[in-house]
Image: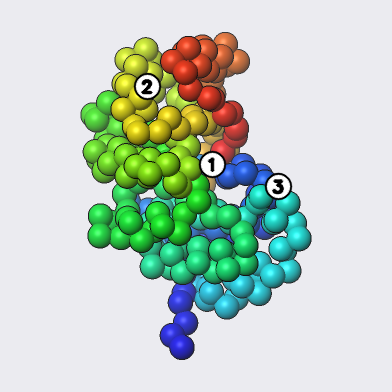
Amino acid sequence: MRTTYGKIHSIETLGTRDGPGLRMVFFLAGCNFRCKFCHNADTWTETGAKRVSLEEIEEKLSGMLPYLRQQHGGITVSGGEPSRQTGFVIALFKLAHKMKLSTALDTNGTCPASKRDALLAETDIVLLDVKASEPRLHRWLTKGSLKTVLEFGRLSAKNGTPELIIRRVLLPGINDTEKELRLLTSYLKSLPVRPKVELIPYHRLGAHKWKALGKIYPLENLKPPTSRQKQRVIKFLRQHGFKVLTGEK
């Protein structure tokens, strides 16, 4: 039998921020975006990644099952961008389902079109990062196209499964303007099901990684949102009928 391997940057054994319940979070190596606020810039390439087999992961999961099954927990793949290793993620999610664990995909939505259906068929929860809602702003922030992100969201919401949660890292004065919020809610209302929105306050905890990599941190002067700024966005989204989740990332 052919062994399936993934290139993994790191594993968080008992995560509580990336999906419901307790979760084992796999941070996969490699990303096609270059987000100016990225707190995991060390996952952009496969440098230093460990080649891990499904058998190794199954053994690791087996010892954690009593904890991971609490409150409908399971596994989450993040990164980096996990859909760059779609074959591995699909195999990993199938393993998780065999072990009666839920699966969550934290993604920028750029999965290759030919593999989207197969990936979503094994995904219980999509955590879709919509960094910005205006195409030029999105490209400035990420160096990537917004169009593919929105298409992936539409496909995810098509049948109501998997559950879709739209994530946004809140960047004060950048992607929390009235124009941005109106564009975001317009997109969300266009979907066949109404997703939850998770707001993640911008922080600078990953800035030191940029320095360690010899890179200049682009948002050096940006401060985290104040409580008032966060509440303004929460109020706007709730007034438009959306359930708002809050968390840190």
Which residue is found at the position 58% from the left and 28% from the top? 246
Which comes sooner in the sequence, label 2 or label 1? 2
Q: What type is the residue that disc 1 sits on?
A: Gly
Image check: 48 left or right of 192? Answer: right
Which residue is found at the position 73% from the left and 51% from the top? 70
Q: Which residue is mark 1?
A: 206
Q: Nearer the viewer, residue 142 or 108?
A: 108
Q: Which residue is mark 2?
A: 185
Q: What type is the residue that disc 3 sits on?
A: Gln
Q: Secondary structure at mark 3?
A: helix
Q: Position of residue 126 (x, y in %)?
A: 46, 45
The nearer-to-camera label among 2 and 1 is 2
Which comes sooner in the sequence, label 1 or label 3? 3
- The answer for how far apart the CA atoms under marks 2 and 1 are is 29 Å
Q: Does residue 148 sit above or below 138 in this rendering?
A: below
Q: Quadrant of residue 186?
A: top left
Any part of residue 126 in sight: no
Q: Residues within 10 Å of mark 1 (few under 14, many from 20)?
A: some
The nearer-to-camera label among 2 and 3 is 3
The dot on residue 43 is none
Q: Quadrant of residue 99?
A: bottom right
Q: Which residue is mark 3?
A: 71
The nearer-to-camera label among 1 and 3 is 3
Q: Position of residue 177 (x, y in %)?
A: 38, 15
Which residue is found at the position 54% from the left and 55% from the top? 103
Q: Is label 2 in contact with label 3 (beta carbons under 8 Å)?
A: no
Image check: 125 left or right of 140? Answer: right
Q: Nearer the viewer, residue 3 or 209?
A: 3
Q: Position of residue 194 (x, y in %)?
A: 43, 30
Any part of residue 2 in sight: yes
Q: Does residue 182 sit above or below 167 in this rendering?
A: above
Q: Secondary structure at mark 2?
A: helix
